[in-house]
Image: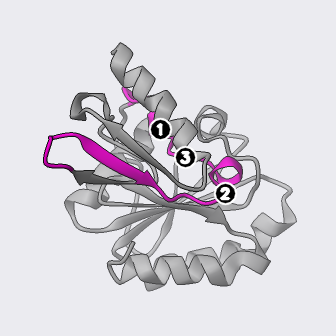
Amino acid sequence: QRAAHRSAMILSLAASLPSVVLVLPPTQLPPTHAGLRPVHSPRALVVAEATTTDASRYGIDPRLANPEAVAEAPEWSAGRVGDLKTTGELRAAVEAAAADGGFVCLKFWREGCAACASTAERFEQSAEANPHGRFFLVNYGRAKEMCRATGIRVVPAAHLYARGSLVAALPLGPSKWEAFAERLGARAGGGA
């Protein structure tokens, strides 16, 4: 338990840096490692390179802060946007998506946020265009514990999860939409 907590703290720090290489024994690497790409070395150590950008503004994987969180999978149907409120729901959604080869896309937003509202229709259209992706809205006011665990300081923001891991944390405002759409297109096509 202590080693897992220490690893989560190290990984959280690593996610705030533009690039870092960690060498940890496999027993110290949590099962979910946001923004880290594991590589197994000949000596059975795990080498992971953090490549997250702006993680300090757009957040880290909240599962790192609450590794025991479990819940029923949130209600979801292909081509539609669902609501997600807890880290346990996120864990269930990411596991379900990983099992069927899909991905999870979260949009963090706040009520009264003009930039959040301005991308609402495009986010729904993205869900319709990517039925193998599980799209969810995370209302900052209703999912405070989860949002605090991410460390998000800017909304709207998006998190993309694939193969059980957070692969991107990025802005989602109107001026940043094209970069998000490119990243989503790479994810929909099977890229990182």
What stretch of residues is rendered in magenta? 41-69
Total number of numbered labels? 3
Residue at which label 1 appears: 11
Q: Is residue 163 visible?
A: yes
Disc 3 from disc 1: Cα separation: 6 Å
Instruction: For the residues labelled 3 and 1, say whether their Cβ atoms are less than 8 Å apart.
Output: yes
Q: Is the C terminus in the top left, top right, bottom left or bottom right quadrant?
A: bottom left
Residue corresponding to mark 2: 54
**Can residue 86 be seen at all in this image of the molecule?**
no
Q: Which residue is drawn at 33% across and 74% down?
A: 132
Three-letter residue code for mark 3:
Ala
Secondary element at image label 3? helix
Depth check: give the residue in front, 109 or 68: 68
Picture coordinates of residue 143, whole percent (x, y): 62, 39
Q: Which of marks 1 and 2 is nearer the N terminus?
A: 1
Q: Which residue was labeled with disc 3?
A: 15
Is 42 on the left or on the right of 12, as rendered?
left
Along the viewing direction, whichever of 167 and 127 lies nearer the viewer = 167
The structure residue drawn at horizontal position 30% and vertical position 68%, both measured from the top left corner, is 102
* Rendering quarter of residue 46: top left
Q: What residue type is labelled 1?
A: Leu
- Residue 12, given in percent of the width and then of the height, sits at 53, 37
